[in-house]
Image: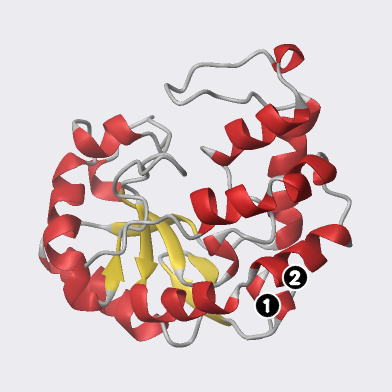
Amino acid sequence: MTPEQLCGQDATHLTEVLFGQKLFLIHPQVEQDLLALRDAAAQAGFNLNIASGFRDFERQKTIWNNKMSGISIILDSDSLPLDPAQLSDEQKVLAILRWSALPGASRHHWGTEFDVFDRNSLPKDTTLQLEPWEYLTGHQAKFYQWLSVHLEQFGFFFPYQKDLGGVAAEPWHISHKATATECLTQLTQDQLAKQLLASDLLGKNAVLQQLDTIYTQFITNICRGD
C-alpha cells in the first residue's frame, strides 16, 4: 500500500461491500472473512452490524480538530470531561489519543477495522454509545462473549481488548489480523510525519514533538491476539 492509502488519504485499494443496509469500504482481503463472521453470528442468533468501518483522514481530522479546539469534549481515562483550559497542547494530544486515533494513524484508514454490535440486543429507542460497559455487562455482553470465543477462527482479533496504557479498551473494535498486521508494519513513523506535516491538523507541532512516544504508546502498542 502507498503512504497515502495507509494514512487514509486514498481509498482506491478498497472495495464497496453491502453490509446490512449500508455500503462500506472494505479491504478486498478482508471481505470474505467478514461475511463469514456475520453468517456465523447469525447462526448463533446475533445480528452483527457495523457501527463504524473505514474512516478517511479528513473525517479523523475533523474529530481530532473538534477536540483540540474545544468544540468536542476531551475525556480522561475514566470517561470524565477534562477542562481544556488547564491543559497544554502536549497534554491535550495525549488525552485525546486515549479515545481518538491520530489522523493518519487510525487503523480505521485501512479497511480492516470494524466497530461491531448485535442489533438484536440493542434495546428499543436506545442509541449505541460504544462504551465498555455495554459489552462487558450490558446489552452487548452475550454478543461480546460469543465474539471472544469465535473471532479468531475467522481471522479477526481485538487490538484493544485490554488497556495497555495507550488506547483505552475497546471491546467493540475488531481487526482482520493478517491484513492489519501488514498495514501496521508498512506504516512507518517517517511516513506518518510527512503526512502530518502537509496537513492542517490542530496541535500539529505538539504531535510532531511527541511522535516517538505516540508511535510506540498509541499506534504499535496493541493486544496481538496471540
Can residue 76 be seen here? The reply is yes
**C-alpha span from label 2 to label 1:** 6 Å
Task: Determine whether, in the image, residue 63 is placed left or right of residue 196.
Answer: left
Quick one: quadrant of the C terminus?
bottom left
Is residue 164 left or right of 53 when viewed as pictured?
left
- Residue 28 vs 75, above or below: the answer is below
146 shown above or below 92 = below
Q: Amino acid at mark 2?
A: Gln
Helix, strand or loop at label 2? It is loop
Q: Residue at x 61, y 35 (%)?
A: 94
Residue 149, picture quadrant: bottom left
The residue beneath circle 2 is 9
In terms of secondary structure, where does tag 1 sit? helix
Where residue 176 sits in the image (x, y, percent)? 37, 73
Structural crowding at the residue carrying mark 2, measured as other residues with C-alpha within 10 Å and reported as few (<14), some (14–19) or many (≥20): some
Is 49 located above or below residue 19 in the figure? above
- Quarter of the image where one finds residue 148: bottom left
Judging depth in this view, the residue of 190 and 138 nearest the camera is 190
Label 2 with label 1: CB-CB less than 8 Å: yes
Q: Residue at left 14%, top 50%? A: 145
Q: Looking at the rendering, in which quadrant would you find the N terminus?
A: bottom right
Query: Toward the viewer: 39 or 180?
Result: 180
Asked whether residue 123 appears in the rendered view, the answer is: no
Residue bearing mark 1? 5
Residue 54 lies left or right of residue 34; in this view the side is right
Answer above or below: position of 74 versus 181: above
| Residue 101, position as x, y percentages in the image | 59, 49
Find residue 164 and report its horizontal and vertical position in percent.
36, 44
Residue type at mark 1: give it.
Answer: Gln
